[in-house]
Image (tube, rainbow, N blue to C red):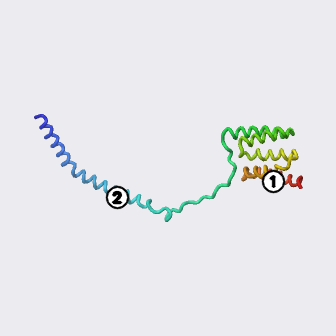
Amino acid sequence: MGERRSRIVTFQVQKDVVSLSQPMTIFLMKFWITGMVVLLVLTLPACGRRGAHHPKPTYAKPPVVESPRPGPEREASNHLLDEGKKYLDFGMYNQAAYSFQEAISIDPNNGEAFYYLASTKYREGEYGRVPSLLDRASLLLQGNEEWGKKIQELKDSLREVKP
């Protein structure tokens, strides 16, 4: 008998809930439908073709400038470069050339090392490799006006010495 009573109570509660909330349900459904229509009206224009109203922007390409390679390779190469510059200042061309070659072997994109190796070879009177070293330095340091002037000065000096 206890089971039967609970079923009756449950049915009456459910019946009362349905009968009490029916006007509220209709109101909520109308409100929900209106909200969905407004949402569709607001978002529908964004679904249009991109090319028709909003052309894809085009940007100018930035100039190619050597970006130093981050990491320990570049640091080691720059350390050898500094060492080679000191040797070059003291006229120790063999040691300077060795330091610059080591810097290049560690980081083959170090344009400064190519320039200073070319400068060392020029000072030693070994003009054969200087043009190719300067070309490589120019390629790696393109976009840098200061280095462009230095490279051009060394090329001009080479033309004066070498017929």
Image quarter where the N terminus lies is top left
Disc tally is: 2
Q: Position of residue 54 (x, y in %)?
A: 51, 62
Q: Position of residue 62 (x, y in %)?
A: 65, 55
Amino acid on which disc 2 is placed: Val
Amino acid on which disc 1 is placed: Gln
Query: What secondary structure is marked by label 2?
Result: helix
Would residue 13 appear left or right of 65 to someone viewing this image? left
Q: Residues within 10 Å of mark 1 (few under 14, many from 20)?
A: few
Q: Nearer the viewer, residue 50 or 95?
A: 95
Residue drawn 12% across the image and 38% down it: 4
Image quarter where the C terminus lies is bottom right
Residue drawn 88% across the image and 47% down it: 125
Q: Which of label 2 and label 1 is nearer to you?
A: 1
Of all residues, the one furthest to the front in this rendering is 128
Q: Position of residue 57 (x, y in %)?
A: 56, 60
**Residue 37: quadrant of the picture:** bottom left
Residue drawn 28% across the image and 56% down it: 30
Looking at the image, is mark 2 or mark 1 earlier in the sequence? 2
Q: Which mark is residue 37?
A: 2
Q: Is residue 99 above or below residue 54?
A: above
Q: Which mark is residue 152?
A: 1
Q: Is residue 133 above or below residue 58?
A: above
